[in-house]
Image (spheres, coloured by chain):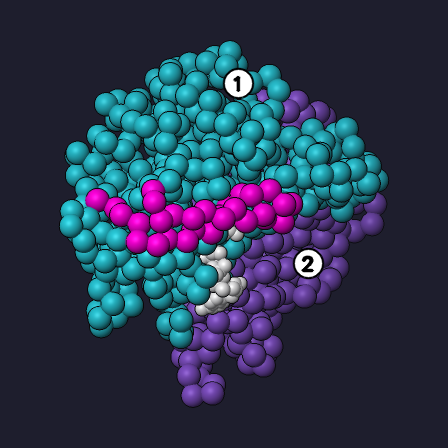
Amino acid sequence: MELAHTADVEAFRAEARTWLRAHVPARPLPSLETAEGFAAHREWEAVLHADRWSVVSWPEEYGGRGVDIVKWLVFEEEYWAAGAPGRVSQNGINLLAPTLFDHASPQQRARVLPSMASGEVIWAQAWSEPESGSDLASLTSRAVRTEGGWLLTGQKTWSSRAAFADRAFGIFRTDPDAPKPHQGLTYLMFDLRAPGVTVRPIGRLDGKPAFAELFLDQVFAPDEDVIGEPGQGWRIAMSTTGNERGLTLRSPGRFLAAADRLVGLWRTHGDPSDTALRDRVADAVVGARAYELFTWANASRFAAGGTIGAESSLNKVFWSQYDIALHETALDLLGADAELAEGEWAEPWVFSLAGPIYAGTNEIQRDIIAERLLGLPKGRR
Amino acid sequence: MRFLLTDEQSDFARTLRSLLGSAQVPAAVRAWADGDAAPGRALWSRLAGTGLFALAVPEAYEGAGLLPLELSLGFVELGRAGVPGPVVESAAASVLLAELADEALAKRFLPGLAQGETSATLTLPDGSPYALDADAATYCFTVSGAGELRWRGGPREPVRSTDPARRLSLPPAGGDDGGELLAAGPAVTRAAEAAGRWARLLTAAQCLGVGEALLARTVEYAKQRTQFGTPIGGFQAVKHRLADTLLDLEFARPLVWAAALSPGPGEVAAAKLAAGEASYRAAMTALQLHGAVGYTEELDLSLWLRKARPLRDAWGTPSACRAEVLRSLTPPRR
Ligand SMILES: Cc1cc2nc3c(=O)[nH]c(=O)nc-3n(C[C@H](O)[C@H](O)[C@H](O)COP(=O)(O)OP(=O)(O)OC[C@H]3O[C@@H](n4cnc5c(N)ncnc54)[C@H](O)[C@@H]3O)c2cc1C
C-alpha cells in the first residue's frame, strides 16, 4: 500500500497546474445557469479544449490525453484547487460519453464526441418525466418507427441545462406491449432545436433556469442516433448511472477545494469560542479527506482490473450529504451575510441542496446499499 | 499510488480473523470481566503466535519492526472479535520504549512484549487518568507531566467501567509513589507523544472492527427476525439505518489506512474521529434494531455494545480529535 504518486503522475500534475494558473479566469464567470453565464462557460470549454484539457481521460483522437483514472483524479484536484469554473458540458462528458464508449458504434463516436469535447455542442439528459422520477422504468414517452428513424412524442422534465443546451439524450418506449416496464425501451439522441421540440425553462429554488421541461411532438431522430440496439435502452441507461453516482460526477478534488475555502472562511470569520462550529469545520476537513481516500481506494481497484457496482451508491449518498453539511457550515460562519444572494457561498449552497435528489434519490441509493451490499431482503419498489 | 492492501497484508488479517473466530472470545471476555484473566491470557498467547505483538517492536529487540499498517489491520480484527485486555496499551508501551532509544531499557522490556509473554498498560500526561487492566498487565507504565517514566506492579484501587471487560484503576495519589523511575526528560516526553499517537491509531482500528462486528450481527438478525409476517430487514426504515451504518464504516476505513501509512497527528486524529463515531453509531443502530433483546447483557452483542462508547472516547475524544485535525492544518494544505 502506497499513497505517493509516481514521478510521471507528479509531472502531469505540475503541467496541469501551470496551465491552469495561466488560463483560469481571474474573476469568476457569471452563473452558468443564466444565458450570459452559459455562453461564458461554453467559451471556457473551448479554451480548455484548445490545449486538450477538457476531456483528459478520453483517447487522443477525440481531443483527450488518454490518461488513466489516477491522472484524471489528479487533474480534478488541480482544477478545483485553481478555482476554475464549473463544467457546463458535464452531462455530456460524464453521462453520455461513457455510454458512447461502452455502447456506440465507431461512427457515432466520431460524430458526437469531438464537438462535445470542444463545448460546441452541449448535451442535456432527458430521462425523467412528470410521472416517472424514482420509478424511471414507468416512463411513457414514445418513439415510433418511421422512414429512416423514429418519431419522439411525450414530455421530459428536470432536464439540467436544457434551457440553453443544444442536444439531448434520453430513453423512450419503443415497444408498449413489452411484458415488463424495463423492456421495450430505446436509448436515443435528439436535437433540442428540431421541429416539434418545445423547451420550457424551469426556475430552480433561486429562480435561475437551471433545468427545463421538454415537450416532444413527433420529433424526428434518425436511426444513426440510436445508441445500442433498440429495446435495450434500460440496460444501457443503467450502465450510465454507475458513472453518475460513482466517482466521475463529483470528484474529490471539488470537495477538497471547498473544504480548504471553508477553513479559510473559519480563520477569518470564526468565533474562537464557538467550538460547535469549529467541530463542524473539522468534520468538513475530515469528510473531504475520507472521500478522497475512498476514491483512491476505488481507483486502485479499477487500476487492478476491478469494477464499480453498487458501491457507487455509497459514494452518492456520502458526497451529497457532505456537500450540504459543508455549505451549511459556511453559511453559519457568515452569520447575517449568509442570506445575501450574491454571496460567494449562496449559489453553491442552493446547488448542494439538490444532491440528495438527483442522480437517483438517496432513499433509492440506501435501498441499493441495503439489498446489494448487505444482502437484506428486497422490498416493494 | 496503490491504495490497496497487498496480498500479504490481507492474508495476515484473514489468518487472525479465522484464529479469533474459533477461539471462543466471548467466554474469555466474560471471564475477564469477572476478574479471571486466564482464558484471556491464553488467547493472548495464541495471538502472540501470529507475530501480532512483534509489529510494534524493532527487529533489534525480537520484533518485526515498527509496522503500523500491519498492526492496524490486526487491531481491526481484535475489535471485530472483541478481544479483552490492554492490547492498545501494550503496543503503545512498546512504541514508547522503542522511541526512547535507551538500549538497557529496550533490552529489558521489549523482547517480552514482542513475544506476547508480558503485557503492559500505560497512562500518559493529558490522557485518561485511569489505567486499563492494570490488574492483569505485567507492567503498569506511567509518564508524568514532568516527563518521568515509571513502572510499578501490584494491585491498585479499582474503578468500574461501563464496559465490565475494561478494568480500570486509578494510580495512587501523588506522582512519586515509589514506582521505579526508568527515564526522565524531553526524550521521554517525545517518546510519549509517539506512543499516544499509536495508541490513538490502534484504538481507531479497534473501533472499526467493533463497528463491523456490530453491523454484521445486526444484518444477520434483521434477516431472520420476523415481525408482521416478514423479516424486519425488508422494512425500509430498518434497511436505511443499516445502509447508513455501512456508509459510516466504509468512509472511516480509508482514513485508518492512510493514518497507518503516515501517522501524523492530523491523519491519526481524523481516523480516530471517524472510526470512533462510526462504531458508536453502529452500536446505537445495533441496539435499536435488536429491540429489547439487544438491551440484555446475556446476548453476546452486549460485549461490543458496551465497548463502542468507551473506545470512541479512549485515547482522544471526538472533540480532542477535531481540535487536532484543525491544528494540524496550519499552514494550509495548499
Ligand atoms: C437539480 C436537479 C437536476 C436534475 N437533472 C436531471 C437531468 O438532467 N435529467 C433528468 O432526466 N432528470 C434530472 N433530475 C431529476 C431527478 O433525476 C429526479 O428528481 C429523481 O430521480 C427523483 O424523482 P422525482 O423528483 O420525481 O421524485 P419522486 O420519485 O417522486 O420521489 C419523491 C420522494 O419520494 C421518495 N421515494 C420515491 N420512491 C421511493 C421508494 N421506493 N422508497 C423510498 N422513497 C421513495 C424519493 O426518495 C423522494 O424523497 C434532476 C433533479 C434535480 C433536483
Answer left or right for A303 relative to B119: left
Disc 2 crowd rating (10 Å Cα; few below 14, some 14-19, many 20+) is many
Answer left or right for B178 relative to B166: right
Residue A76 at what x, y percent from top left? Answer: 45, 29
| Residue B297's disc number | none
Judge whether residue A205 is colored magenta: yes
The residue under label 2 is which amino acid type?
Answer: Leu
Q: Nearer the viewer, mark 2 or mark 1?
A: 1
Q: CA distance from mark 2 to mark 1?
A: 59 Å
- Total labels drawn: 2
Q: Residue at x 56, y 35 (%)?
A: A34
Q: Dividing the image into 4 quarters, which one contains the C terminus of chain B?
A: top right
- In the picture of the structure, the residue carrying the numbered disc 1 is A24
Can the viewer see residue B251 in this picture?
Answer: no
Residue A211 at what x, y percent from top left? Answer: 50, 46
Marks 2 & 1 on one chain: no
- Please, what secondary structure does the residue beneath circle 2 have? strand
- In the picture of the structure, the residue carrying the numbered disc 2 is B168
Q: Nearer the viewer, residue A238 or B205?
A: A238
Q: Main secondary structure of the magenta part?
A: strand
Q: Dividing the image into 4 quarters, which one contains the N terminus of chain B?
A: top left
